[in-house]
């Protein structure tokens, strides 16, 4: 049974306030997209890697890593889940529904090889799809529209979802399709799988696997990426 990857990279990254989409911002001489793709290309378990792009993407051809023969390109859609479905549709022609597919955001450039390995081994061994996640360490408040606190959530049992998220290709496509038909907004693959009734396994990942969303995240990502390899553990 094979394992493939989909990298949604078709967002516009509005919250960064930059002229380019955030996946094309540069850290240490490489774009976020290249940093996010590199650990997947270095993983021998992965067969095809589909990078999902805006249909008229003017930046991608300048990136040498994208010329690797395992990398395929698909067109994205208006929501992240539409883009993931675009990537899965491309895989449908060349992969089996029982194959595993790993979805990893182009905006998460600091994925450590050990975390990727832990996710792969855990999911393949158990047969239950899962995702990297980290336990919530802060106290989390719920508030109303005036930012007045309406409650404090019980912290134990709360996790922050990361990517990669790894599921069977056919089940994930069906779950995302179902969410689309029901017009449910799903912000990650796990949410679609949960709603479709599948068990989903959390696999603890490093807190350094951040998603770049606002300008300060770039500085943090640069710091993590410039650390020696030996320090990049859980
Ligand atoms: O916007 P957000 O940070 O949630 O995006 C997460 C990832 O999903 C990014 O890599 C972004 O490029 C991708 N995305 C996409 N298609 C969209 C929206 C986001 O591929 N329509």
Image (cartoon, helix red, strand yellow):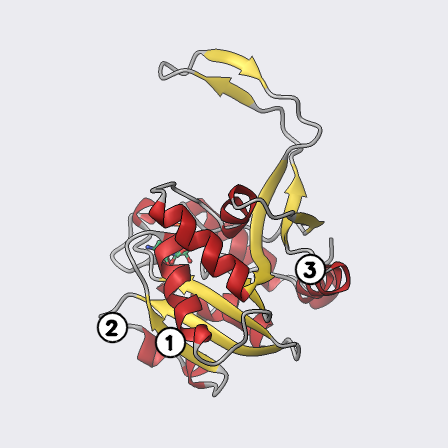
Q: Quadrant of ligand 1?
A: bottom left
Q: Which residue is mark 2?
A: 58
Q: CA distance from mark 3 to mark 2?
A: 33 Å
**Total numbered circles:** 3
Instruction: Give the image location of residue 112, x and y in percent.
Output: 65, 62
Asked whether, in this view, residue 172 is left or right of residue 132, the answer is left
CB contact under 8 Å: marks 2 and 1: no
Report the front residue among 80 and 229: 80
Image vertical order of residue 73 relative to residue 182, above or below: below
Report the front residue among 84 and 143: 84
Instruction: Give the image location of residue 116, x and y in percent.
Output: 66, 63
Report the front residue among 29 and 14: 14
Instruction: Give the image location of residue 17, x and y in percent.
Output: 29, 48
Say which label, 3 or 1, has the lower sequence index: 1
Say which label, 2 or 1, has the lower sequence index: 2
Q: Which residue is mark 3?
A: 119
Looking at the image, which residue is at 33% across and 75% down? Answer: 60
Looking at the image, which residue is at 36% across and 60% down? Answer: 83
Q: Secondary structure at mark 3?
A: helix
CB contact under 8 Å: marks 3 and 1: no
Q: Which residue is mark 1?
A: 73
Q: CA distance from mark 3 to mark 1?
A: 24 Å
Specify few, some or many for label 3: CA neighbours under 10 Å numbering under 14, 14-19, or 20 or more. Answer: many
Question: Where does the N terminus fall, quadrant-wise?
Answer: bottom right
């Amino acid at each position: 049974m094979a394992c493939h990857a989909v990298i949604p990279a078709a967002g516009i990254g509005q919250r960064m306030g930059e002229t380019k989409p955030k996946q094309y911002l540069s850290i240490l001489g490489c774009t976020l997209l290249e940093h996010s793709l590199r650990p997947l290309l270095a993983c021998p378990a992965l067969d095809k890697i589909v990078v999902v792009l805006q249909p008229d993407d003017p930046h991608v051809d300048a990136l040498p890593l994208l010329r690797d023969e395992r990398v395929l390109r698909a067109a994205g859609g208006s929501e992240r889940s539409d883009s993931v479905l675009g990537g899965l549709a491309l895989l449908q022609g060349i992969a089996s529904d029982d194959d595993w597919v790993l979805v990893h955001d182009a905006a998460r450039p600091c994925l450590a090889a050990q975390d990727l390995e832990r996710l792969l081994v855990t999911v393949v061994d158990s047969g239950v799809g899962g995702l990297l996640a980290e336990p919530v360490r802060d106290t989390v408040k719920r508030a109303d529209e005036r930012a007045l606190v309406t409650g404090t959530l019980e912290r134990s049992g709360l996790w922050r979802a990361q990517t990669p998220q790894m599921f069977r290709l056919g089940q994930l496509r069906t779950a995302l399709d179902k969410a689309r038909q029901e017009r449910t907004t799903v912000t990650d693959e796990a949410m679609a799988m949960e709603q479709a009734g599948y068990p989903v396994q959390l696999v603890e990942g490093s807190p350094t696997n951040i998603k770049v969303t606002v300008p300060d995240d770039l500085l943090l990502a640069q710091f993590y990426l410039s650390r020696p390899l030996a320090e990049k553990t859980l």
